[in-house]
Amino acid sequence: MKRLCVFLVLTIIFSCKTPVKDSYTIQANAPGVYNGMRVYLKVQDERSRLINVDTAIVIDEKFSFEGISNEPSLQYLTINSYTGNLPIIIENEDIKIQIEKDSLHTSKITGSKINDEFEEFSKKEKALSNEIRNILNSQRKTRQNNDNEENKRLTAIVSEKSKKLINLPLHYIDGHEDSFLSIINLHKMTLINRTSLDSIQLGFNKLSDRLKNSSYGAKISGYLELQKIKLEKEKATQIGAIAPNFISRTPEGENLALNGIKRKITIIDFWASWCGPCRRENPNVVKVYNKYHDKGLEIIGVSLDRNGQKDKWLKAIKDDKLTWHHVSNLQYFQDPIAKMYNINAIPTTFILDKTGKIIAKNLRGVALENKIAELLN
């Protein structure tokens, strides 16, 4: 009898436990939204673009979604013909939304613990943003009144509160090391790219193993690795560093090495025939080259023209009268030299001394001519 009672008690305990849901539903009331309107759930890709992942249609001022979420995921709800979006964290729960059609981001989400956490966090963000906005409004008045001291004081406060706002997700991690909101916020910081790499790494290190092994964890790990590689490349091309050597093909098909060019001053000029700013700068570079070549200036042009467009590259060299050394792998921004020098935009120039040390970079127009004059006159 005693054993039977124990068995019954255990049965009651376990039968009363809330079962873990393996799918989600979203039921939304959308007063004032017309029948037939399409509603989208979107995710943000690594280039901060919103990509559709699911679609619903409004019927009788209601719409719904359902699916399976392997882990909580930040998505954005949008409605055709209505501005803005509603950030929502999708998890396997029965989620309800009361839509505010004229202000989507103020719509009310219930039925999900993580969205309750998200709402509280968003309130703190909004409060800080409002504080900053109010101070900026006051600052405008101080400028109108030429009150420099007060303006300086308010500038310092804005700077302090702006840093606090940016780092709010990092502070949230403390005490929430196993909350998906922590890693979702941290991932958003990698997309905004306003936080130091060390801060993101520190925040990531605090997270639980469960979060580190999630899909968001994999994305953040990949981001950290890429940024570290980028930093190493930037160090290799900083002023004071020895310019990385490279070997590439000339228009005649011969190999040319940077280290094979021994002059007092060498300019590495990244450009392309399709680049308007490059072509507009070329006359100035030609003038500088013609004026200082006999005094020890050499230039090596690295073209980021595309594959199959060698003829356009050669035509631009001829048309612009670029009589110096030229190389290209015709691989656009995937050119190995461009990657070695961390080139994300052109024109970009590096000025090297006779030892190959980078002594200046990204100079154009009069600034370029003045620098070369300073070095060779």
Image: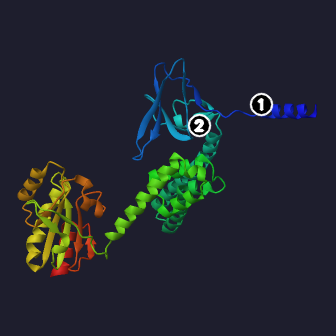
232 displayed left or right of 274:
right
Amino acid under disc 1 = Ser
Question: Of helix, strand and loop, which one carries label 1?
Answer: helix
Depicted 53 relative to depicted 312: above or below: above
Depicted 373 relative to depicted 246: above or below: below
Depicted 269 relative to depicted 176: above or below: below
Q: CA distance from mark 2 to mark 1?
A: 23 Å
* Residue at left offset 8%, top offset 71%: 290
Q: Position of residue 74 (x, y in %)?
A: 53, 41
* Residue at left offset 72%, top offset 33%: 18
Quadrant housing residue 7: top right
- Image quarter (top left, top right, bottom left or bottom right) of the N terminus: top right
Nearer to us: label 2 or label 1: 1
Q: Which of disc 1 and disc 2 is earlier in sequence?
A: 1
300 displayed left or right of 138:
left
* Residue at left offset 64%, top offset 36%: 112
**Pointer 1 residue:** 15
Amino acid under disc 2 = Glu
Of residues 372 and 306, which is closer to you in this image? 306
Residue furthest toward the right? 1
Quadrant housing residue 341: bottom left
**Pointer 2 residue:** 91
Is residue 127 at least partly visible in the picture? Answer: no
Is residue 155 at least partly visible in the picture? Answer: yes
Tell me whether the residue at label 2 lies in contact with that at label 1, contact meaning CB atoms closer than 8 angstroms. no
Q: Position of residue 62 (x, y in %)?
A: 55, 22
175 displayed left or right of 199:
right
Mark 2 surroundings within 10 Å by alpha-carbon count, few (fewer than 14), some (14 through 19), many (20 or more): many
Mark 1 surroundings within 10 Å by alpha-carbon count, few (fewer than 14), some (14 through 19), many (20 or more): few
- Image quarter (top left, top right, bottom left or bottom right) of the C terminus: bottom left
41 displayed left or right of 233:
right
Q: Position of residue 144 (x, y in %)?
A: 45, 59
